[in-house]
Amino acid sequence: MQERKIELYHDIMYQIIGAIYNVHNEMGPGLNEYVYQEALALEFAEQKIPFVREKEIALSYRNQPLKATYRLDMLCYNSAIIECKSVESLSQNHRAQLFNYMRLVNAPMGILVNFAQRNAIIERYFYDKETKEICDINGNPFSQK
């Protein structure tokens, strides 16, 4: 992904991550992820960051709608997916979940946050619709090993 494209999203990422840190600093580590989602919704509203909580994603197979759906924890600015976790450590499964959501809705930004630690663990990713690649914050394709 071109570095210039990533720079376009810098301000949005900065606002969202600031809100995440505010919530973590106020609530502390180790609570249920739904508590953080609710607090984050309040923080987003206070900062006037546009968001939708538990955004439903409709799925289809060969142009036929499926009954199964996914729910994003948060979608901000209609372009950034935030997945909240409160776990011992983030796993490849957590990343895969975020990456699948980013691909399904063509979201250019994804943030995976773990609130369980003393300091919030925040991972930022970008999705390039043209190449269909997930990239790290430096624009390098992310490889799940």
Image: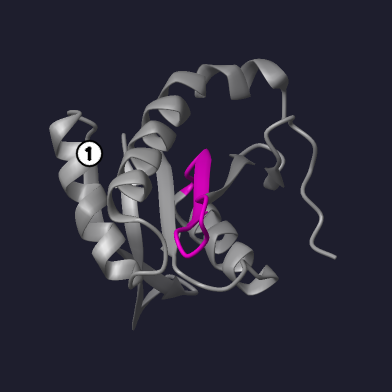
Q: Residue furthest right?
A: 145
Inspect the magenta stretch and tell me whether residue 114 lies in it: yes
User: What is the quadrant of the N terminus in the image?
Assistant: top right
Q: Is residue 54 visible?
A: no
Residue drawn at point x = 28 percent, y = 47 percent:
26
Tag 1's secondary structure? helix
Number of labels in the image equals 1
Residue displayed at 42% across by 49% down: 81
- Residue furthest to the bottom in view is 67
Q: In the figure, is residue 53 to the left or right of 14?
A: left
Q: In front: 114, or 93? A: 114
Query: In the rendering, at what x and y percent does residue 124 appear?
Result: 59, 42
Task: Assign the magenta stretch its main secondary structure.
Answer: loop
Which residue is disc 1 drawn over?
44
Q: Is residue 121 magenta?
A: no
101 versus 125 height, above or below: below
Does 21 sit left or right of 55 as displayed?
right
* Range covered by the magenta-colored residues: 106-120
Q: Quadrant of the C terminus?
A: bottom right
* Residue 21 screen position, x and y as percent: 40, 40
Q: Quadrant of residue 44?
A: top left
Q: Residue at x 69, y 69 (%)?
A: 92
Answer with the quarter of the image where residue 22 lies. Answer: top left
In the rendered image of this protein, does residue 46 appear above or below residue 103? above
| Amino acid type assigned to the residue bearing label 1 in the image | Phe
| Circle 1 Cα neighbour tier, 10 Å, few/some/many (<14 / 14–19 / ≥20) | many
The one nearer the camera, 30 or 99, is 30
Is residue 31 among the parts visible in the rendering? Answer: yes
Q: Position of residue 112 (x, y in %)?
A: 52, 54
Residue 70: x, y in percent?
37, 72
Compared across the picture, whether 75 is left or right of 44 comes to right
Q: Residue at x 33, y 37 (%)?
A: 19
